[in-house]
Image: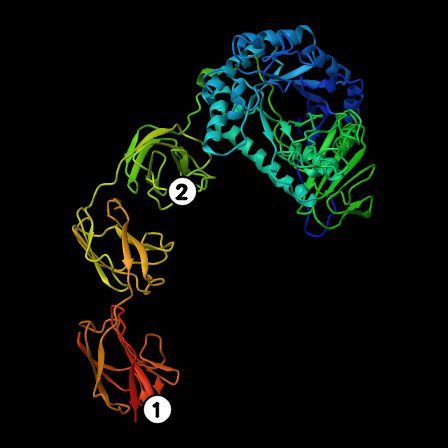
Amino acid sequence: MYGVGRAVRIDIGPGRYRSAAAAAVSRQDYGINVFSYDSQMNSPSTIAGMTTLGMGMQQFPNANEWSWTTNTFRDGGTAPVSLSDWGSILEQTNNQGLFIFDYDENPTFTGGGSPADATQLTQYIVSHHLPITAIVVGSEEYGSWDHYANLNPSFSASYYATRTAEIAQAIHQVDPAMQVGVSFDLGQEPSDLQWDQTVLRTDGPYINFVSIHDYPNAQTLSNAGLLAALPSEIHQAMTFVQNEIATNVPAPYAANIQTWVTEFNPYGEPGPQSTQPVYGAAMVESAMLWRVDGAAKLFVWSYDGQAHSPSAQWPVDTTANTAYGLFALAGDGQSPELPENQLYPSGLSLAQYMQAIGTGGTLSVWVTPDQVVGDVQSSSGASHIFAINTSNAAETLGLGGTQTVVPAATMLATSGQTITPATLTLTPGPTPPIALATSQPGLSAYQPVPPAITDTLSGYPGETVTLTGRGFGQWGANAGVVISQNGVNYGGPLDSYGVTIKSWSPTRISFVVPNGTSGPSLTPGSATVLVETANQLVSNSTSLTVTAAPNLNLTLSSQSPYPGDLLTIFGSGFGAAQGTGYVQFSQNGINYGGPGDAYHVSIVNWSNSAITVEVPNGSSGPALTPGSATLTVVTGSGTPTPALSLTIVPPPLLSAAISPPGPVQPGQLITVSGNNFGSSQGTGYVLIQQNGVNYGEPGDWYGVSIVTWTNNSITFRVPIQGMSSTGHEEPSLQPGSATMTVVSGAGLQSPALPLTVN
């Protein structure tokens, strides 16, 4: 499917060249979705409309409760388009068909589900010479929204994968050339990955392609925003699919598996640009990008797709009689502005692209921050340029030796032009897929080994537990332990709540049972655990029995401490030494003392039955403020206590009096009498303030010399001109008024006492 293109270069501005691999393209690389329930398919204008569109494939029936044998629906009624009718449409439009095989219907309803029915269907296709070249088993079988049509009691990936392997082999036994595909989920939550990996590991030897559906944008974007978003969205989706195939299927089988995008539209619901030329630009841009990024087929949803709905979210045309949504390439006759099967701008643009491909050619694409430019070299030798300006400003393109302006958020399509200068050599594209053989040597040795957990777990919230198994690999960006309980998920890539990993090896992972530090705490009862590896492999799930945390019998020396107070926590089982244990205070969303917290808690003493801590007073982070707070102890073995409630109160004021009480002189020794100063100065200080100048507080330029410090008495020298205790030359106190404050090492503060300086 892929080859090497000619040497070309696009002139789009200094330093903005990027070449892409060239891919061989044909009409059969592109298709549309059509429907067994669509009466428009019987219109005389259908063949002309589809022929004008020029695509080479169609997907049918897009109705999973329809029987191909009777052309009836499960709930009654006959479909407007039968399998035979569709075969005739394929022949008249020179299209190939992709048939959706109804997966696992109720056995009482004929038309799908079993390997025997797959055999019968393939025999019918072959004997009636229908131009159907591919069959996909089911459609979005991974989604709960599809289960209403699937009456088998098991919706598991394992059941689907096992059944599909049987169906694929039955099809290939009748027609080895028939391409067979499976449903692949683009979601990257663990449940999505588990589906994909189970299916790939089971069905890898028997399938030819994975079928993906992509509607990347959930909300309306601006014109430029839509065009600018598509390159990264498409590239990310293809990279994910290719990585999953390469990781889960051994190379000889992985080489057989193509990626088919069997449903695509830029929006998840019809968007307001649907009737505007920008949507045609988006469709051509997507058609080029999917192919050069490695997709073998792209099917646009849809041809008409019952486009009109009075309850549509977005009205897309102000001239419409009623609000309607459009998700199609052609009109269905219900809109006032287009007759049946006449192409919309998106259809017209794709038709122009298909005409450029003609009977086949080579596609080269360049992507820059502002443009996506494709060069289709048809087999006749003609060159066709499709330049999409993805920015909000006009861009220039070097064509035929001249600079051509491409307006903002538009597509320029031109033929017979050359891109200048032609000097950049392209690199080869991906390795061509290997044709599926009727027999697969070495199939008995096909045993992909997924990561596996080999034990069940038990632990209480906050406890560090260890799971064992195999294939966990090394820690990486995507690696994690995913826990689920009562509909709440922790640790997945899109989960709001995390799981703390303590250690990770290929066979052992230690993690903390969620205890409320991220999301709600787990509660006693059952939970499930699985592992996602760095390369996004998902293990089996195992059970986690959540138990109540052990009671450490906590009591506090005070329920109403103040910032700087020494608080003693009494209990049992703290451990003889602190080790990795800690005490955490929490108030107003701020945490102190935990391993990852920015603010610390000073541990004064730690024993098995008592811990003494200093209540945060501003030495690390903001001081606790009067009001409610909580305290939690985590032992060195990882055992957390329940959070204890505290009421923080203002620090008590120190009582202090100056002796002698009269006026003071610079250099005089003054004694302050009182209580609770502390047995030694520690971090305490005497603060003198006069005329906006501070003396003695930590960080002040000028100091206060302390002579003695006891719990009830402090003697200090009144600042005098000369060298202070801070090492800086300072002035004397000036005659007049000043104030003096004592601050203890515990953070207690006296009232400001007046000083009169002579």
Tell which of 714 and 577 is nearer to you: 714
On residue 734, the disc is 1
Q: Kindly identify the amino acid type of the residue bearing the numbered disc 1.
A: Gln
Q: Amino acid at mark 2?
A: Gly
**In which quarter of the view is residue 131 placed?**
top right
Helix, strand or loop at label 2? It is: loop
| Label 2 to label 1: alpha-carbon separation | 61 Å
For the residues carrying marks 2 and 1, which lies nearer the camera in this image? 1
Asked whether the residues under the numbered discs 2 and 1 touch, taking CB atoms below 8 Å apart as contact, a structural biologist would say no
Q: Give residue 407's position: percent from left, percent from top.
A: 77, 47
How far across and down, in percent of the image, does residue 75 sit?
A: 59, 13
Say whether residue 166 is left or right of residue 578: right
Displayed quadrant of residue 347: top right
Label 2 belongs to which residue?
498
Residue 668, position in %: x, y?
24, 90
Is 395 placed left or right of 495 in the picture? right
- Whether residue 737 appears in this view of the structure is yes
The image quarter containing residue 649 is: bottom left
Left or right, residue 696 beside residue 443: left
Of the 4 image quadrants, the one containing the N terminus is: top right
Q: Which of disc 1 and disc 2 is earlier in sequence?
A: 2
